[in-house]
Image (cartoon, rainbow, N blue to C red):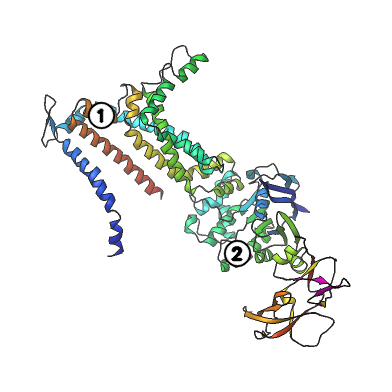
Amino acid sequence: MKSGTRLVLLTVPGVILLAAIYVWPMYGLGRMSFNETGPTGAMIPALSSKTWRELFADPFIFELTWNSIQLSVVSSTAALIFAYPLALFLFRTQSRWRGVIAALAIAPMLVNGVVRIFGWLAILGDRGLVNAALQGIGLTSQPVRLVYNWTGVTIGLTESLMPYMILALVAGFGRLDRSLEEAAASLGAPPWRRFLRVTLPLSLPAVALGWLLCFVLAMSAYITPKLLGGGRVFVLATEIYELSITSVNWPLASALALYTLVLLLLFLAAYSAMSRRQA
Amino acid sequence: MSHLVLTGLAKRYGRSVAVDGLDLSLAKGESVALLGPSGCGKTTTLRMVAGLIAPDAGSVSVGGADLTQAPAHKRDMGYVFQSYALFPHLDVAANVAFGLDERGVARSEKAARVREALSLVRLEGLEARRPRELSGGQQQRVALARALILRPQVLLLDESLSNLDARLRESMRHEIRDIQRRLDITTLFVTHDQTEALTMCDRIAVMNCGRIEQIGTAREIYDSPATRFVAGFVGRSNELALSRDSGGRPVLDGAPLRLARDPGGAIDLHIRPQHLRLGPAGAPASDAFNRLAGKVAHSVFVGDRSEVLIDTKAGRIVAELPPGDTAPPDGADIVLSWTPDAGHVFVRESV
């Protein structure tokens, strides 16, 4: 057997698994979106574009798209801003607590998403910690609405993205060599100039990768918008759920799911085009 | 007139002392090597001079100005790293111009100075290359140009040649020495390679365990090592343990020895291989020489001369023959001889 052939064999288990759990269901999803829904709401097997036309006829889809992208961009960017210094610290520190701090940073991943959201409700709710503090120091007399709206969803989503962002950044900081900053210092660059001219540019690939990963996770997040949004926050993921479980309109839910997938693929394509141009 | 002055520099990490009260001063334009084995504190010293680490005690001054508290970016010192530390995201021209950008040098002057710096290290035409597209020697030159373009007061080189292959290292040695002399730049050079120290520097400071054991010109250090460590580290030497006869005179293998100096007590004699002469056993003895009998273990031809390993009652000894001399056959009985002033005597350290 030629080594090329043997190399291809390495892909076999993955290909089989992906075919079974991804390609086949995706085909089912695609096929479903070409069925029709009757006036009673019953599904009629067909091969028509009626569902797709219906999807794009309703301007609500554009509002959902905008909502999803906006939420994902804001929460990924916020996660980046909070995670970057922490990741840099973890990458650089020689403290013997490094392992503990790293574990703490990614510990939220180990907590069930629903449990975590109840935690946020307790903190951000009308009678929660934050409002008690704000009223206690006399900043407001009325509770500030921090849950069941976009603010709450953005806060919750940002927090749930942080561990992923930290992991992606720490893994991607590989090119950051301490001696490069020392060299910049010896050439007369003060600390913030060293960050701007050396550290930041060299960490951009990690930033792009972490941001994209979090963006994709945010676009498909369902539990956080659903529970912290309290029914007032509408994004693509919650709508797909509503259509398939509540309205039981499977063709339309399938079409919306495929539409979301295409949207994500467009972002991925933009990213890979950008990183190719970098290299 | 001293230009770069280090006074009582000290640094410890936890319990281990890296640098232990080091004093050193360099004249303007002088080049000094910090030579020592790894872990002797030479790189720590260099980094304290550059301001990359803070000393626990002592001071660093340049041209009379105390810089001990000044951060690295305000010290006006060029530093060439062992790994070169070129910025991988910038091309050669931008790497070299990095320091000029920090000083806000005008664009036209910047271009001229980059050209000048690159021609100094003979890298014209490579402005647009990225560091990873350069050979090790070229990267080394970029690092040098990047440091020199700022016309720093002091140039610091940290094992800067150790990542190059032997041939390139040889030519870079002369090139850096030449540039250093031409620019008349005060240079402190860290190395564990004695050839590098001997060829590139006006004076050598031999370091061991965080201290300077001896400082002097290459010849001073080689010909009259101040300590046993220096004798062993710079050049090769044979160590012979001496004992004393009933009259208190030093003896080796039962025969009395004539020494240039005898500090008394338990002493060892260090002799360089080229100061030993070989003669056939039974050759007439002369009072002018010390003698030691031995048997040739084997000999090696090392290019222009031969080295002979000899087993004696004082242990195995290396002798170097003058060029052109043929080594005696293996197993031959011979007599080693040397003049009283050839060796260096050190008091044996109590263990």
Q: Is residue B225 above or below residue B310?
A: above
Q: Which element type, helix, strand or loop, lies under badge 1?
A: helix
Q: Residues within 10 Å of mark 1 (few under 14, many from 20)?
A: some
Left or right: B314, with A56 as reference point: right
Amino acid type, residue under disc 1 in the picture: Tyr
In x, y percent, where is residue B171? 60, 67
The three-letter amino acid code for the residue at tag 2 is Met
Is there any visible trace of residue B32 in the rendered image?
yes
Residue at screen point 27% across, 35% down: A260
Whole-number angstrom distance, CA of label 2 to CA of label 1: 69 Å
What percent of the width, then of the height, locates residue A17? Answer: 26, 47
Q: Which residues are magenta?
A: B236-254
User: Any magenta on residue B253?
Assistant: yes
Q: Residue at x 45, y 45 (%)?
A: A171
Q: Answer with left or right where residue B60 lies relative to residue A36.
A: right
Q: Locate residue A26: give its quadrant.
A: top left
Q: Residue at x 31, y 59 (%)?
A: A7
Q: Nearer the viewer, residue A22 or B191?
A: A22
A205 on left or right of A14: right
Query: Residue A12, how many percent across, how many down?
Result: 27, 53
Q: Is residue A275 magenta?
A: no
Give the labeled residue for mark 1: A241
| Residue highlighted by disc 2 | B172
The chain letter for the residue carrying disc 1 is A
Quadrant of the image for the N terminus of chain A? Answer: bottom left
Mark 2 residue crowding within 10 angstroms, few (<14) / some (14–19) / many (20+): many
Q: Is residue A147 above or below residue B9?
A: above
Q: Which mark is residue B260?
A: none
Q: Chain of mark 2?
A: B
